[in-house]
Image (cartoon, rainbow, N blue to C red):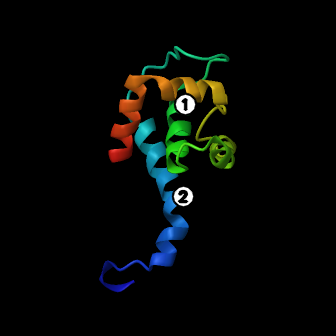
Amino acid sequence: MEDGFIPKKNHLETEKTDFIEVMSVFIDGIDIQEDQLLGRPKSNMRDILKSLLIMSYHCFSYRRSMSDIEKLREEGLILSKPAISTLNKYMQDQQFQELIKQLIEL
């Protein structure tokens, strides 16, 4: 499109896909402590963080996020799908909440 104008319909259709791609590249590029402190079975911290960001996109609805989290796993962007109990435990952690807020702002 001329003058950098992106039709609104096209932008809305790709918004979630763009969010997932940018989020994955950004998280994969930062140094994250790999040790999971909460939850069993153990999950990769990047997988938990990516899953929580997907949940933030869906207003923290696990039900609405499930298909996108499963898609991340199928595409190899996460190694495993974290359990809902693990995601809930991390969302209750104050430091993790601050990290999620900062990542959303970025």
Left or right: 97 with respect to 63? left
Res. 106 in view: no
- Residues at marks 2 and 1, CA–CA distance in whole angstroms: 18 Å
Residue at the (50%, 29%) spot, across then down: 91
Q: Quadrant of residue 89?
A: top right
Identify the residue under disc 1: 48
Residue 34, compared with residue 70, is above or below; it is above
Residue at the (40%, 42%) spot, across then down: 26
Given the image, on which type of amino acid does mark 2 rest?
Thr
Q: Secondary structure under badge 1? A: helix
Tag 2–tag 1 contact (CB < 8 Å): no
Q: Picture coordinates of residue 6 (x, y %)?
A: 40, 77
| Quadrant for the N terminus in the image | bottom left
The label on residue 3 is: none
Q: Quadrant of residue 61?
A: top right
Residues 54 and 2: in front is 54
Q: Picture coordinates of residue 19 (x, y %)?
A: 47, 54
Residues 104 and 63: in front is 63
Residue at the (58%, 41%) spot, across then down: 77
